[in-house]
Image (cartoon, rainbow, N blue to C red):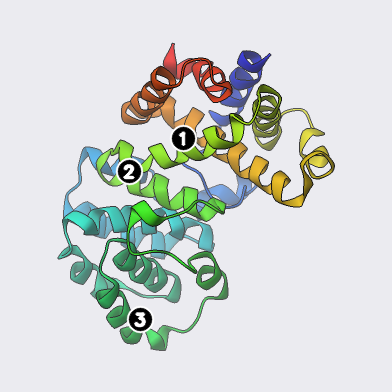
Amino acid sequence: MLRHLIGRAVQLACAIPVFLFSTLPAPAQQASTLPPDNFAYFYQDPRPERLTEIFASVQNTATSWIAFPPLTGLLAADFKSHPEHIDRLVPIVKDVKASYALITAARLSGQPAKAEMLRAKFTNLGFDQTLNAEFAGIPTRFEDLQITRPTHLDILWGASFAAGDSRYVMPIVDYFAAAANTSELVAIDITKTAVEMTGGPKGTIAGLKAKYGDAGALQMILAATALWAIASNSRQHDYVKQTVVRYVGDHPGAPATKALSALPALK
C-alpha cells in the first residue's frame, strides 16, 4: 500500500515546481511567485553574476513573499563560502522583501553583525509583517535551524541548490523520517496526506486533527510536505537522490525507509 501511495504522490508532484513553497498557490498564481527557472540548478553554474541575476529577477517578478525563503536559503549557503557576495548584492536591493532575504541570509551564514548593519541600512524600506514572522528566530548556523514550519523547508531546499549539497537535504529527510518512523500507520497517513496535497483523493487531511490532535496534525502535514518535495527533487537532482539512498541504506526496515524506497527515482 505504501509503495502505491508514494507512486501516486510522485506522479502528482511532477506537475509542480521542483522546490517547495510555504503555501500551495493555484496553478494560475505559480508563474508570478516562483524564482527564475534556473534557480534550482544554480549549483551547476555558481558564478556570482548568476547570483546577482537571480536576486534581481526575484525582486522584479515575484508578487508574493513565498519566493523569498528559498532565495534566502540559496544566498545564505553561498555567503558561507563567499561572504564578499553580500556587498555585491546590497546596491541592487529595491524593496523590503529583498532586504529581509539579504539580512536573514547574512545572519544564517554566520554573520550576525553584518546582518544588523544591513538591517539598519534598509530601515527606510519599511516593515514586512509576514516575512518578519516567518524569519523570526532564524539562527546564525544552518546546523541550529529546527524545522517547525514550511518556510524552514524552503530555506533548506534553497541552500541545497547553492552547491548541490546534501548537507541541507539531510535535515529534511530526517524530519520526515522522525514523523514517519512513529509507526507504519503514521507513515501511511503522511503519504496519503502528500497525495491529497498534490491533488489526490480527499479526506485524509480533514481527519488528521481528530486522529492526532492539533500539534500532531500540523506535524503530519509538514512531514507530508517534506516527503512531496523529497520525491520531486529526487527525480531531478542526483545529490538529493543519493541523500535518500544513504538514508535508506542506513535504516533498513524502518517505516520511513519503506516509504522512501518506493520513490521511482530510486529504482
Along the viewing direction, whichever of 198 and 249 lies nearer the viewer: 249
Q: Which residue is mark 3?
A: 119
Q: Residues within 10 Å of mark 2 (few under 14, many from 20)?
A: many
For label 1, the SS is helix
**At label 2, which amino acid type do we have?**
Phe
Q: In the rendered view, does 237 fall on the left or right side of 265?
A: left
Q: Earlier in the sequence, mark 2 or mark 1?
A: 2
For label 2, the SS is helix
Q: In the rendered view, does 28 fall on the left or right side of 166?
A: right
Q: Residue at x 61, y 14 (%)?
A: 3
Residue contact between numbered discs 1 and 3, judged by CB atoms under 8 Å: no
**At label 3, which amino acid type do we have?**
Arg
Q: CA distance from mark 3 to mark 2?
A: 25 Å
**Would residue 50 be seen by someone viewing this image from the given angle?**
yes
Q: In the rendered view, does 205 fall on the left or right side of 119?
A: right
> Residue 161, which numbered label?
2
Instruction: Please provide percent x and percent y for residue 180.
Output: 60, 31
Q: Residue at x 23, y 37 (%)?
A: 44
Q: CA distance from mark 2 to mark 1?
A: 16 Å
Q: Which residue is mark 1?
A: 173
Q: Residue at x 43, y 64 (%)?
A: 138
